[in-house]
Image (cartoon, rainbow, N blue to C red):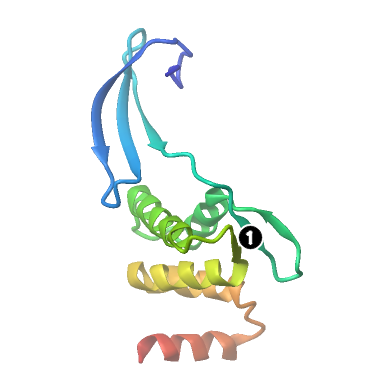
Amino acid sequence: MKCTYCSHPDTRVVDSRETLELEVTRRRRECEKCRKRFTTYERVETENILVQKRDGTRQAFDRNKIKCGITHACEKRSISAEKIDEVVQKIESRIRSRGRNEVASKAIGELVMKHLKRVDDVAYIRFASVYRQFADVASFENEIKALQE
């Protein structure tokens, strides 16, 4: 693995950990030249999944889109990057466990909201406001009331 800092081709694994779902291996590496450390993730290459969008178009599933949406919703909240990665991994695992090669974007959005609700109420409301396209303050109030119940 090439060093992300100095591009030296030789690095060594300092620590390896399996995730709870045993689908991803997290490795801490150290560069043999500059001695800086960085993290890599190893996952099994799986079958491509298509996402059916609201307008009927289809595009390849991209876990980074989920991660970006969750990260944006969690900005300025005390939620670690590791927790965000864990949520993304759980969502991706759930999608892949369905055994289908196509999933509706609506199903992905609902999974994200389900997991964010467990992590942080504010991040959940932020994501829901974009995902459900809140048009006014009443939409926010209704969602907050539902969350409090």
The N terminus sits in image quarter: top left
Residue at point 25%, 32% (across, down): 16
Q: Residue furthest front?
A: 99
Q: Residues within 10 Å of mark 1 (few under 14, many from 20)?
A: many
Count of numbered circles on the image: 1
Q: Give the image quarter of residue 32.
A: top left
* Camera-side residue of 27 and 48: 48
Front residue of 57/75: it is 57
Residue 58 at what x, y percent from top left? 71, 59
Q: Is residue 6 above or below residue 51?
A: above
At x 52% / y 51%, what residue is drawn? 63
Label 1 secondary element: strand
Give the residue drawn at x 38%, y 58%: 90
Query: In the picture provided, is 71 more to the left or to the right than 77?
Result: right
Rendered location of residue 147, percent (x, y): 40, 85
Left or right: 25 with respect to 110? left
Q: Nearer the viewer, residue 142 or 12?
A: 12
Task: Quadrant for residue 8, please give it.
Answer: top left
8 vs 25, nearest the viewer? 25
Amino acid type, label 1:
Val
Name the residue located 34 percent from the left edge and 48 percent from the top edge: 82
Residue farthest top in this picture: 33
Query: Where the C terminus falls, by quadrant?
Result: bottom left
Q: Position of residue 132 (x, y in %)?
A: 60, 78
Residue denoted by label 1 = 51
